[in-house]
Amino acid sequence: MSQMVHIVDRRHDARNKSTVNRQRFLRRFKGQIRDAVRQAIGRRNVRDIDAGEEVHITGKDISEPQFRHGRPGVWRRVNAGNDRFVPGDELDRPSGGAAGSGSGQASPDGESLDDFVFTLSREEFLDIFFEDLALPNLVKTQLAQIQEYQSRRAGYTPTGTPANISIRRSMRGAAGRRIAHGAPLKQRLQALQAEWEQVVAERGEGDPRARELEEEMARLRHRLEAIPFIDEFDLRYTHRVRVPQPSTQAVMFCLMDVSGSMDEERKQIAKRFFMLLYLFLRRTYERIELVFVRHHTQAAEVDEDEFFHSRESGGTVVSSALALTLKIVRERYGSQAWNVYVAQASDGDNWNDDSPLCRQLLDESLLPLCQYYAYIEINDEQPRNLWEEYARLLPRHRERFAMQRIATPADIFPVFRSLFQKRLS
């Protein structure tokens, strides 16, 4: 009589099981989640970027396909006829609102499923927001000061750790060794077997020569059986070497106008834009240098804290910031290895005689050294003289020069995405 055995699996779930399931869910509904993030961009400001986002997914999108057995046998079905409508008839809209829409009269008929609400964390929201953004034209590489290495396979080695053993390569080597060692013995054994058969046929099995041949064949078979299936000599391990990789170097110049014409509201918009740019660069690129430049009548290179929080103000001479940027580029980032980027934020109000000089500095000196230059004018009125001068550069430098206007804080996100959208190579 057989005995029934019950096996109970009491192992705990893996520590990261919920994380894996969550990532699988994000991949499956990435389209709906991306749409929700895109809608959230239009109603957020930079201060809200630390928060997550609630994603609503309709019930039909999370329904799982199901299989069931069909009705067995051969059978017929009779469907009711249609005596009211013909193709092309238009149906009246039901009165009282759709079931579950939240409006209209209550009805005993119909049922629906509430949307599934899924909350994105801050990190997940930012990952989706930044996934299709990049610094344009990031192509230059530096080979002299390489700090990045990549592990690559470099054949096999007879020594290594058990984790790196190559079973296929080891077994192939063992098979080759057995063939090489056993082939001469097998050939000798076949020759002795043929001679033994001839001696037995002529003289019988009791002949002394036949017994000598049998002993010799036994020794050869023992030597064949003693050849190990796999030997330590056969073991091969995957060999990996660290190969230096070209390291892309980039520097971003952040130029902000802090003159008297930039009132507090415009300065706050500029700060929010640069905060978003700063967050994007730090999350997307492991090593990128940032240079902060503030200017009114005079320009100065400052640190991050002073750039975002200093209350210094004055007149407006935009060319001072461009001249300082050009000087820093030539002194510290003048080699061909650096990708130079500039983001300039201003209200466009500049001394009239200075705006043509700004265009000349950009056209002849700064733009040829830059991979990308973005000018953001924070102004809800007519374009100022600086915008008009910069617009003359677009026909010649359209690939590396871009201009956008921000009127309200709600424009920060769309403008940012427009300036740093990934270009197809």
Image: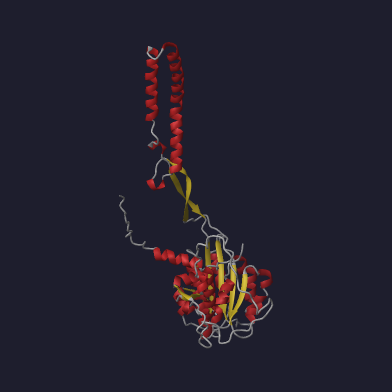
Q: Give the percent coordinates (x, y) of residue 360.
A: 65, 73
Return the residue nearer the eye: 362 or 252. 252
Q: Give the percent coordinates (x, y) of residue 234.
A: 41, 37
* Total number of numbered discs in the rendering: 0
Q: Is residue 353 visible?
A: no
- Among the 4 quarters of the image, the one containing residue 193: top left
- Among the 4 quarters of the image, the one containing residue 192: top left
Return the residue nearer the eye: 16 or 238. 16
- In the image, residue 155 sits, relative to residue 66, either above or below, namely above
- In the image, residue 110 sits, relative to residue 289, either above or below, namely below
Q: Is residue 8 visible?
A: yes
Identify the residue at image location x=61%, y=74%. Answer: 80
Identify the residue at image location x=37%, y=16%. Answer: 211
Return the residue nearer the eye: 146 or 53. 53
- Among the 4 quarters of the image, the one containing residue 237: top left
The quarter of the picture where the C terminus appears is: bottom right
- In the image, residue 71 sits, relative to residue 166, either above or below, namely below
User: Taking 33 as reference, is 219 left or right?
Assistant: left
Return the residue nearer the eye: 334 or 154. 154
